[in-house]
Image: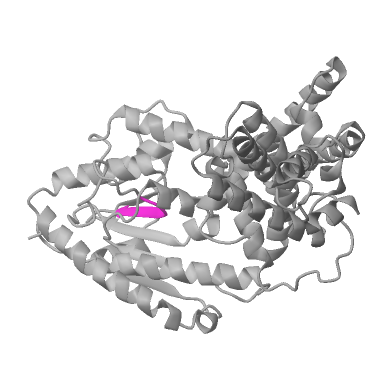
Amino acid sequence: MLNRASILAARISFKMLTEQLLRLHPLINFTRLIKAPLVITGQGLGGYLAILFTLLYQNAVDIEESNGSKTAKRPICITFGAPLLGDEALGRAISERRQWKSCFVNVVAITDPLASSFSSNTLYKPFGTFMFCTNSGGHTTFEDQVPVLAVLDAMASSNAGNSQMHDYTNELRLIRKNILYRGVSELSGFNLNPLRAGIASQFQEIGLLDDTSDHIIAETEEKRLKIIKKKRKDNAYQPMKKLNEMKISLTYMEWHMKMQRMEGGYYDSYKNTASIIQIKKKQEVIKHQRILNQYWKKMVEEKNLMPQKEGAKLRKRWLYSGTNYRRIIEPLDIADYYKRGKTDYIGNRPKHYELLEKWSEDDKKGQKPNDGKMKAACLTEDSCFWAHVEEALILLNELKNGGSSRVDLLHATLEQFEVDLLVAIKDFAVSPDVFLEGSSLMKWWRDYKAYKGSSYVSELICSIHE
């Protein structure tokens, strides 16, 4: 009996099989497999395993391509009557990559009760192409979620009480014999534009036009129009072109950074803006700061949803730009943060900065360190450097004011900051302007030496004054 309880029990069995497949995953030699074309298929709950294996396979192809391979073949996954798998996030992640999305084809007979067991009233969402088939040979395809879920809802209603497992032999035979669409000309009595008429004909092809409300057709039409407009826009603004446009703002910021070294340093001149001339400059800086933040927040969000790495060359280009952006713009965000009287920036650091730094570090793994570096960085390598300085100032003030119940912790934290600063200086990982007279770092250093007393001896003294 194909009731909800039996389907849930089947899902539990599927989960166990999934865990076994994931355990076997490291043992599968994808490098050998991906050199030849492959079709992966499964019916019913077996379609789940077919989809999961295809995702693993696609990831293996992406890794090979990112390593420069041009011979890897992508698989095709064809399922028959598989219930929905995955939520909105999974569907969106797959849809972000056409090479992934286009490989999934789900053949569904409208009389199959298992395929419609999870529809629009659940968290499960469709992805890939759905081909709906009738017993008489009618069939049509949808990729949009709205019509797919509408058809599944209609199927669930008409298949209520049906417990028969469906045999797809007939559907395969009829698909080979018939064309995919019969055309708009067969729709009599409809005064529709071609796009809307085409959508209506798709529902009519499988006998569900009367059961489908006009707003479903209108919603599908609206979504397809948005997709068409987006594709046109994407063609006009390709990723690399947009990245190059962002370099204009980043170049301005690099120029501004060099100019501010004569006015007390990049970080402190931004934080301590006072004169009218400085305010006007800051307004222009804020404009470019916002442009870059908006772009990179969106870029990181999209990259984080994508289920595979970019090609090696493209990935290095945007990671390099992302690292420069982080080292130039994040100090300004830190200045804004502490100027508002807040503390603990690191604990509240924006997610896109964290991910950019993580991806950059991951990309460096396996590379040889630059042992011969003998020149200070033009950009401080740790984009959170000024947050550490601000926290050191706050902790030092707490010690100087007395009455703190955590004196030992404050001393230990400041001593560790001193050690970390010395390491960064020796590694040439900080830019020279952090040592300008009047900078926040030098203010901390002057107050810290005074607090420690005249007998205080530190290796940092020589390093800072060299």
Can residue 94 be seen?
yes
Q: Tell me where residue 269 appears, x and y as whole percent.
A: 81, 30
Whether 411 is drawn above or below 75: the answer is: above
Question: Closer to the camera, 58 or 15?
Answer: 15
Above or below residue 293? Residue 457 is: below
On the question of residue 180 being in view, the answer is no
Q: In the displayed image of the protein, which residue is found farthest to the top? A: 276
* Residue at the spot 34% in from the left edge and 75% down from the top edge: 21
Left/right placement of residue 341 relative to residue 266 reads left
The image position of residue 357, as x and y in percent, is: 64, 54
List x then y, in percent, for residue 249: 79, 36
Choose between 362 and 149: the one closer to the eye. 362
Is residue 268 inside the magenta stretch? no
Residue 124: x percent and y percent? Answer: 30, 49
Q: Which residue is located at x 51 percent, y 76 percent? A: 37
Left or right: where 322 falls relative to 106: right
Front one among 461 and 340: 461
Observer-nearest of 3 and 406: 406
Residue 45, picture quadrant: bottom left
For the C terminus, which image quadrant?
A: bottom right
Q: Please tell me which residue is depicted at 66% across the width and 43% down the height of the picture.
A: 392
Position of the N terminus, as image quadrant, is bottom left
- Magenta region: 126-132
In the visual, does 79 lie left or right of 67? left
Q: Say if 272 sits above or below 418 in the image.
A: above
